[in-house]
Amino acid sequence: YSNNEDQLIKIFKKVKKQDWVFCSWRSHYQCLLKGVPPKLVKQKILEGKSITLCFPEYKIFSSAIVGGVLPIAVGVAIAAKREKKNEKTYVFMGEMTSETGIAHECMKYARNQKLNMHWVIEDNEKSVCTPTRETWGQKKLTYENKADPNITYYKYDLKWPHAGAGERVQF
């Protein structure tokens, strides 16, 4: 994905080495910004692991399962709190995922338990080829323009066709 580099760089200025990052299948930028060497990211992509880039030594995990990393991220944040570790857990998700039950439950639990988490909602107005607002029957999404210190919400336009859009970019 592209056209959201500025937003990601701004967010990652706050992410520390000891912090955790969880994201969806679109994790290439996050891995690089978290400090994973570009050669290692490229190697995993060429090995066919592009949608599940996981580097525990850099404290970054991704999954292609919609919402799959959200409860895991909450569990990591619970452990950090119990062990009194100075770690923050950042969770990146698309706007369609942010409207699912698992996202609402995880965000509510994290807030109510005062977990050291920050949620990043990246809105490209699509989930594969599905228009998010039309799908949910909403003109405005739940977290859109919401003032919450634990949530960063931003919109961006896709530069390339979305995965599953019938157009494939092959390297």
Image: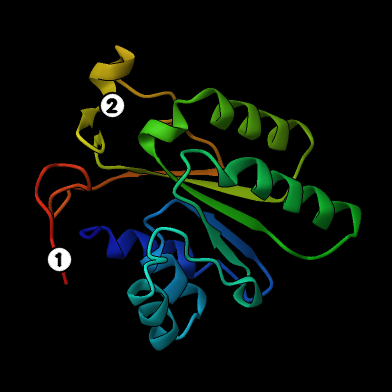
Residue farthest front in this picture: 47
Which residue corresponds to the image point at 45% horizontal and 86% vertical from the top-left?
Answer: 37
Please state if 43 lies on the left or on the right of 69 as rendered: left
| On screen, residue 61 above or below 42 | above
Label 2, secondary structure: give it.
helix
| On screen, residue 40 above or below 115 | below
Which of the two residues, 37 or 133, is positioned nearer the viewer here? 37
Amino acid at dot 1: Gln
Task: Please give the residue where the numbered disc 1 appears in the rendered image.
Answer: 170
| On screen, residue 63 above or below 100 | below
Residue 10 image-quadrant placement: bottom left
Q: Position of residue 16 (x, y in %)?
A: 61, 72
Q: Position of residue 140 (x, y in %)?
A: 31, 21
Query: Of discs 2 and 1, which sits in the foreground?
Result: 1
Which residue corresponds to the image point at 27% horizontal and 58% vertical from the top-left?
Answer: 4
* 2 and 1 marks in contact (CB < 8 Å): no
Q: How many marks?
A: 2
Image quadrant containing the N terminus: bottom left
Please state if 132 lies on the left or on the right of 26 as rendered: left
Q: Position of residue 26 (x, y in %)?
A: 36, 56
**Does residue 145 appear in this view?**
no
Amino acid at dot 2: Thr
